[in-house]
Amino acid sequence: QVQLQESGPGLVKPSETLSLTCTVSGDSISGDYWSWIRQPPGQGLEWIGYISHSGSTNYNPSLKSRLTISVDTSKNQFSLRLSSVTAADTAVYFCARDTYNSGRHRFDSWGQGALVTVSS
Amino acid sequence: DIQVTQSPSSLSASVGDRVTITCRASQPISSYLNWYQQKPGRAPKLLIYGASTLQSGVPSRFSGSGSGTDCTLTISSLQPEDFATYYCQQSYSSLFTFGPGTKVDAK
């Protein structure tokens, strides 16, 4: 059974870069797609972007200028970097396996989520 | 961008009730629609994908239907563990979007 675990700093200063890593176990990252999704406190879900095992990416246009998602197949991990953060980036960040089939994507396994607060 | 709305935004129901939640897209999305359940402090859980396919391990009281612009999630007989927030999500466009959620609480 696949398991995903987010890790990274829980507090980031405004204008700095938010960095998170998702470690995947029970499945090889060399398949499917892998997504980041966030949820501001008390609010709904926002898809951030995905990366494929080959490194191709698709980003939410609203974040694209500040966003980098990368993959390290040797460590079975993928990572998120979001630059120039503001308080609006405060959220629980989830990583998820993004299963692609017949042209359709679905998030079928999720990490527990990591709360990242942007504050000085 | 494809906007996704849900109705109702919240509902109160009793155990054993039949519950229906609707998701509407701003343009046709065929059956590129998934449903998730989220409980407080937990990650979302996939219930239905492709508008009507039940995810492995999900109880059969959950079902999905529809295509085009309107899809529906139905819980045939609400159980105590089903009180939660439900989200729909489209993957028709390259920008995946979620609905705002429907909170199901106890009457």
Image: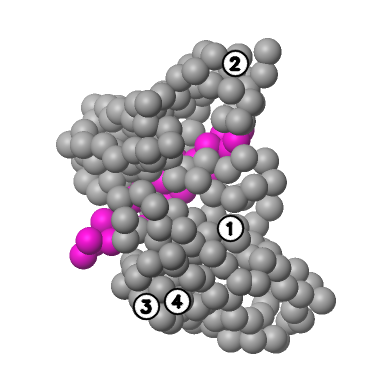
Whether labels 4 and 1 share one chain: yes
Could you tell me which chain the residue with mark 1 belongs to? B
Classify mark 4: residues with Cα within 10 Å, few (<14), some (14-19) or many (20+): many
Q: Quadrant of residue A39?
A: top right
A71, A16: nearer the viewer: A16
Does the CB distance between marks 3 and 4 fall below 8 Å?
Answer: no
Amino acid tagged 1: Pro
The colouring scheme, among rainbow, by chain, secondary structure or one colour, is: one colour
Assign a secondary structure to mark 1: loop
Q: Which residues are magenta?
A: A91-115
Query: Mark 4 or mark 1: which comes first in sequence?
Result: 4
Q: Locate residue B72 relative to residue A76 in the image: left or right.
A: right
Q: Answer whether residue A112 is magenta in the image.
A: yes
Assign a secondary structure to mark 3: strand
Identify the disc placed on residue B100.
1
Classify mark 2: residues with Cα within 10 Å, few (<14), some (14-19) or many (20+): some
* Residue at image mark 4: B70
Amino acid tagged 4: Asp
Could you tell me which chain the residue with mark 4 belongs to? B
* Residue at image mark 3: B67
Does the CB distance between marks 4 and 2 fall below 8 Å?
Answer: no
